Image (cartoon, helix red, strand yellow):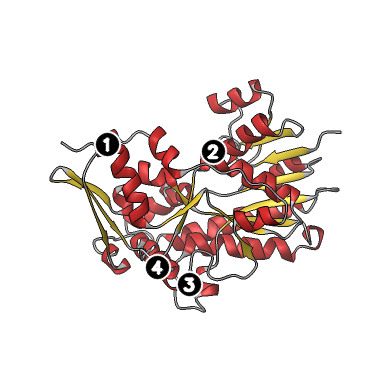
Amino acid sequence: MSKLLVVVSATGNQGAAVIKYFQQHVPSYKLRGTTRNPSSDAAVALAKSGVEVVKADTNDVDSLKAAFQGADAVFAYTTFSGILQTREIMGKVMAGKLPPPVGQYAFDVEVQQGKNMADAAATVPGLERLVWSSLSGVKKWSKGKYTQGFHFDSKEIVREFMNSLEPLKGKVSCLQMGAFADNMVNMPERFGLTKADGQLRWAYPIADSIKTPWIDVERDTGAFVKALLDAPGGTQVVGASEYLNGSEYFKLLCDHLGVEGTYTEVPSDNMVSDDPTGFKLEIAQVYAFVNEFGYDGGDPEVVTADELEKRGYKVPRSKIADHIKRSSWSHLAVA
């Protein structure tokens, strides 16, 4: 009998990627996807492709309980940036109705959404695996040195909550998503990538001695989820298509575009000026954390994909050069 995988927020980047991968490579699974709007074009397209599409909202635990029933496995994730940009949060901070940092409010919402998904999963008889899209705990692993890494810490708080629920004991596995390669395409200036004087410039606050775990979300998220469904519960893996330091990534990009480039390693505190929301400080603290403690904070329970494969669980991965080649960089064209 086919197992049922429920994918939360099936029309979002991570959810859609997982569904596409399973449709193409693991057809033995039945797929159910949740969405707030089953009549959206993306949801209708999923339904036409054979996915059971159901209405559920991560802010509504009862809707999640209904959506999860009968599941053998659940892939759950949240979208911090989407929460952050709402009128109720970013709008009020920008209007002076809430004091910064803006991330503290998104943190509260994201943690509650994660707890809702955990509570819902805990009601499912026969659930074998809950895969949580997570990140390391900045405050925890820095021993309180860095306190503003809200979009990392929220996911660690949820992981701990999931593992505290008796019905989920031994069933929770975590995919610590690496740096989204899409962010370099969609938000280059936020990450220090600009164009000037006929060349590209990248000011990157991660030491070149550190290999960043980049992930091609569209191509590789599903492969990691499949490996975590096969591996024992409690497994934690960094979701990385490839590990590259800043200069390696930048060379791939410049070579693809056929342009000259200037790469500069800069202090993370260079990023925090002229920001009334406090979000730049959050990003700067995450960079500082990675420089000092590593992307996974040095957590001994977190493994790489290579280590997972040594245990017998295959994780097919793509190359970041391929992501660069298929992406549109017209906004960074230089004269």
Give the alpha-carbon distance from disc 2 to disc 1, as whole Å.
23 Å
Give the alpha-carbon distance from disc 4 to disc 1, as whole Å.
28 Å
SS at circle 2: helix
Question: Residue placed at 39% from the left, 52% from the top?
Answer: 90
Q: Earlier in the sequence, mark 2 or mark 1?
A: 2
SS at circle 1: helix
Would you name the residue on which mark 2 appears?
A: 219
Q: Within 10 Å of the Cα at label 3, are there few (<14), some (14-19), or many (20+) other Cα atoms?
A: some
Would you name the residue on which mark 3 appears?
A: 293
Give the alpha-carbon distance from disc 2 to disc 4, as whole Å.
29 Å
Task: Look at the numbered discs 2 and 3 and tell me whether their residues touch, using CB distance below 8 Å.
Answer: no
Would you name the residue on which mark 1 appears?
A: 331
Type of amino acid under label 1: His
Q: Quadrant of the C terminus?
A: top left
Of labels 2 and 1, the one closer to you: 2
Q: Within 10 Å of the Cα at label 4, are there few (<14), some (14-19), or many (20+) other Cα atoms?
A: many
Type of amino acid under label 2: Arg
Q: Quadrant of the N terminus?
A: top right
Would you name the residue on which mark 4 appears?
A: 285
